[in-house]
């Protein structure tokens, strides 16, 4: 009989900088006597991230949610924005905080991303933008989405929270759309403990975003508009500078773990694993399976509960759908009749533990437990 893990095996484990290197960075910060307000560490981080992501212009923020809220302001969005229900709550919330009505569009079953074939019927005279999400780091069909946006004169704001470092046909993911938002929360593949970034092609967008994250202040005596406090501090920026040197190794380690998961789990009836997409440089930010109850013998929820008994802390990403939250369920676009694939997928998906410090025997044990639960 398989024994549970001795300690909770969580969905992820944060990448950490070398403590001695971090202490040296802290000495520099202490000597500067500046802890916030766009100090040297933040400026250096923005330069380093711009180079890493091949972004023309980039600004960092206190977190990804604030970054997304301010991106809506930068693009002057209003009315309605078409987005996906299969995402983290912050995507839809950022719209409502800007007095924008989210309009939910169904998703593709394989990629989990917004289905571009279903976008056009949702466009009205009140639509100002499309906000797709690169779910689990899988790029959306960016060319088709841009064609639709150009046809109707819409902005495209990508929630790229999961897509740090991803490329499409060799092009960085930030090349697409008007603005892309990246999340640097500690659970992400790359982080600044808490944080986020926006990438732009237009320098005026960066100028306005930098102003908005600092209360709308352009100079000591010039406050242009109501902003907020969305600044990243120097200590978190230092973490980001150091971790940027480790992220490529982290991606490589996650790829190896992902391939091992796929190799073992593909032999278990009712378990479907994700596949790499053609011409995409993935970052392996999540490892997601779909559970077919008829073939596996247990539902996704039953598997989730049984894994907990073995101290394996998986996550039902993304359940419930945003469209099924009480605050959104009465929207016309939230009807289950118009979102059949999203509702189906939300009842089947399960994210398994994945991070670069996992060992081969950790993966093998998790897979053996999933197989044993099936055979029970």
Image: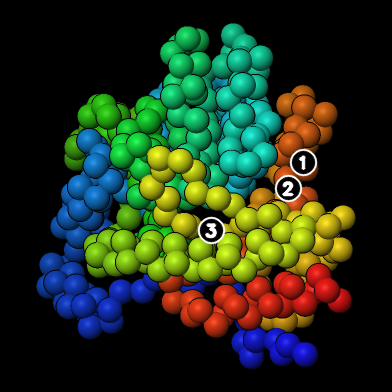
Secondary element type, mark 3: loop
N-term mark: 3 or 1: 3
Question: Residue 177's quadrant in the figure?
Answer: top left
Quadrant of the frame with the N terminus: bottom right
- Give the residue at mark 1: 343
* Crowd band around label 2 with a 10 angstrom C-alpha radius: few (<14), some (14–19), many (20+): many
Q: In the drawing, does residue 328 fall left or right of residue 198?
A: right
How far separated are the C-alphas under marks 1 and 2? Answer: 5 Å
Residue located at (22% from left, 83% from top): 20
Report x, y in % for residue 221: 20, 35
- Give the residue at mark 3: 286
Q: Are marks 1 and 2 in contact (CB under 8 Å)?
A: yes
Work out whether 197 lies above or below 337: below
Quadrant of the frame with the C terminus: bottom right
Question: Residue 85's quadrant in the figure?
Answer: top right
* Crowd band around label 3 with a 10 angstrom C-alpha radius: few (<14), some (14–19), many (20+): many
| Tally of marks | 3
**Disc number placed over residue 123 in the picture, else none:** none
Q: Are marks 3 and 2 in contact (CB under 8 Å)?
A: no
Work out whether 84 lies above or below 288: above
Q: In the drawing, does residue 276 fall left or right of residue 190?
A: right
How far separated are the C-alphas under marks 3 and 1? Answer: 20 Å
Report x, y in % for residue 47: 18, 49
């Amino acid at each position: 009989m398989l024994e549970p893990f001795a300690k909770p095996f969580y969905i992820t484990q944060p990448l950490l900088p070398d403590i001695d290197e971090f202490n040296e960075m802290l000495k520099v910060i202490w000597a500067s006597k500046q802890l916030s307000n766009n100090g040297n560490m933040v400026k250096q981080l923005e330069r380093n991230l711009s180079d890493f992501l091949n972004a023309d212009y980039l600004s960092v923020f206190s977190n990804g949610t604030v970054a997304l809220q301010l991106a809506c302001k930068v693009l002057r969005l209003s009315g309605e924005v078409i987005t996906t229900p299969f995402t983290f709550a912050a995507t839809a919330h950022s719209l409502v905080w800007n007095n924008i009505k989210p309009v939910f569009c169904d998703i593709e079953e394989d990629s989990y991303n917004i289905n571009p074939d279903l976008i056009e019927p949702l466009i009205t005279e009140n639509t100002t933008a499309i906000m797709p999400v690169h779910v689990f780091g899988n790029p959306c069909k960016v060319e088709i989405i841009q064609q639709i946006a150009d046809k109707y004169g819409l902005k495209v704001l990508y929630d790229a929270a999961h897509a740090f470092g991803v490329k499409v046909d060799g092009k960085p993911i930030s090349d697409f759309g008007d603005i892309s938002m990246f999340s640097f929360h500690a659970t992400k593949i790359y982080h600044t403990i808490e944080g986020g970034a926006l990438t732009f092609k237009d320098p005026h967008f960066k100028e306005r975003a930098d102003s908005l994250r600092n209360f709308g202040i352009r100079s000591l005596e010039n406050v242009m508009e109501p902003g907020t406090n969305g600044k990243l501090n120097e200590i978190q920026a230092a973490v980001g500078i150091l971790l940027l040197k480790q992220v490529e190794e982290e991606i490589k380690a996650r790829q190896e773990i992902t391939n091992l998961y796929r190799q073992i789990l593909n032999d278990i009836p009712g378990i479907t694993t994700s596949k790499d997409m053609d011409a995409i440089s993935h970052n392996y930010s999540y490892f997601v399976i779909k559970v077919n109850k008829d073939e596996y013998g247990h539902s996704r929820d039953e598997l989730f509960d049984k894994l907990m008994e073995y101290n394996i802390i998986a996550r039902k990403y993304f359940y419930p759908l945003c469209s099924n939250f009480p605050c959104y369920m009465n929207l016309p676009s939230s009807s289950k009749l118009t979102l059949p694939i999203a509702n189906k997928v939300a009842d089947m998906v399960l994210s398994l533990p994945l991070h670069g410090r996992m060992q081969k025997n950790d993966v093998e044990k998790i897979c053996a437990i999933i197989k044993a639960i099936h055979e029970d």
